[in-house]
Amino acid sequence: MKFYVLTLFPEMVLDGLKHSIIKRACDEGKISIEAINIRDFSKNKHNHIDDYPYGGGAGMVMQAQPIYDAYMSIKDKLSPNCPVIYMTPQGKTFKQEKAKSLAKLEDMVILCGHYEGVDERVIEEIVTDEISIGDFVLTGGELAAMTIIDAVSRLIPGVLNKEASFEDESFSDNLLEYPQYTRPYEFLGRKVPDVLLSGHHKNIEKWRKEQSILRTKLKRPDLLEK
Ligand code: ADE
């Protein structure tokens, strides 16, 4: 899986993803992350990539041309179905289902906006998907892009140690994950539930399923309605 990120802050994206599982996935060639600096495509003598909004109003708007040229600089490398995802609070809320479908692709381009927005014409021209990571406003799309890259990468075969580790996890079946315990058996007077020490796999499975349902009811009843 190749991720191409169009951004004004390439280090933010690359530095944030060079740790732990994602770093290992990059080192092993299971994924690659390329950050393209939109500013490198400025034609302005001061390297500006933004300008005042037509019609007035607060803030600046990212210009179409540097973003378009940044995209065109990688276009030849992209697969025919490569989506161009614009990170914006106006997009569809990102869900595990979307992560699963993106994980099947060969590559994706992620466009990170800043300031008050991006000239609509470049969105119309190159963007295929708009994704939000939640109903709140970030200062830029980078953290959102990193969220997508992390959530998608861990679904790519071989990125996590065990394939099984995401079969059971939260949101598969629209249920939250059951509680987990490790040693010691007792911590601050709290003991591990007996069933987990019983060695009785059927009972353990049943208990975990019940816990998943209970937790979902308690913490995310909206998921059960689905
Ligand atoms: N850019 C700013 N806020 C965002 C959000 N909530 N999701 C995705 N991109 C964003």
Image (spheres, grey):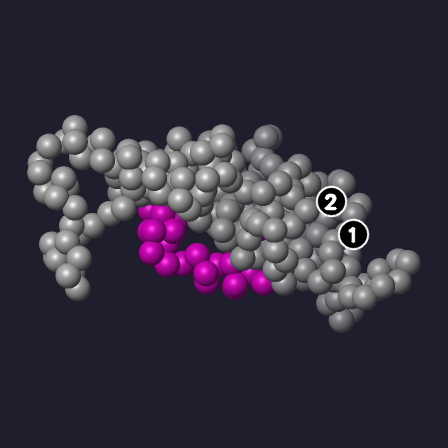
Q: Main secondary structure of the magenta part?
A: helix
Q: What residue sits 27% from the left and 46% below the top?
A: 179
> What residue sits right under mark 1 in the picture?
119
| Disc 1 residue crowd, few under 14, some 14–19, many 20+, Cα 10 Å | some
In the rendered structure, the answer to whether residue 124 lies left or right of residue 174 reads: right
Residue 104 visible at all = yes
| Disc 2 residue crowd, few under 14, some 14–19, many 20+, Cα 10 Å | some
159 or 206, nearer to the observer: 206
* Rendered view: 58 above or below 7: below
Q: Is mark 1 within 8 Å of ligand 1?
A: no
Q: Secondary structure at mark 1?
A: loop
9 or 91, nearer to the observer: 91
Where does residue 76 sit, x and y in percent of width and height? Answer: 62, 39
Query: Magenta segment: does it hold 25?
Result: yes
Where does residue 118 sit, x and y in percent of width and height? Answer: 74, 53
> What residue sits right under mark 2 in the picture?
123
Q: Is mark 2 within 8 Å of ligand 1?
A: no
Q: CA separation, marks 2 and 1? A: 7 Å
* Rendered view: 208 above or below 9: above
Q: What residue sits 58% from the left and 43% below the top?
A: 93
Residue 30 visible at all = no
Q: Which residues are magenta?
A: 5-29
| Kind of residue sitting beneath label 2 | Ile
Q: What is the residue that sits farthest to the top in this orientation?
A: 202
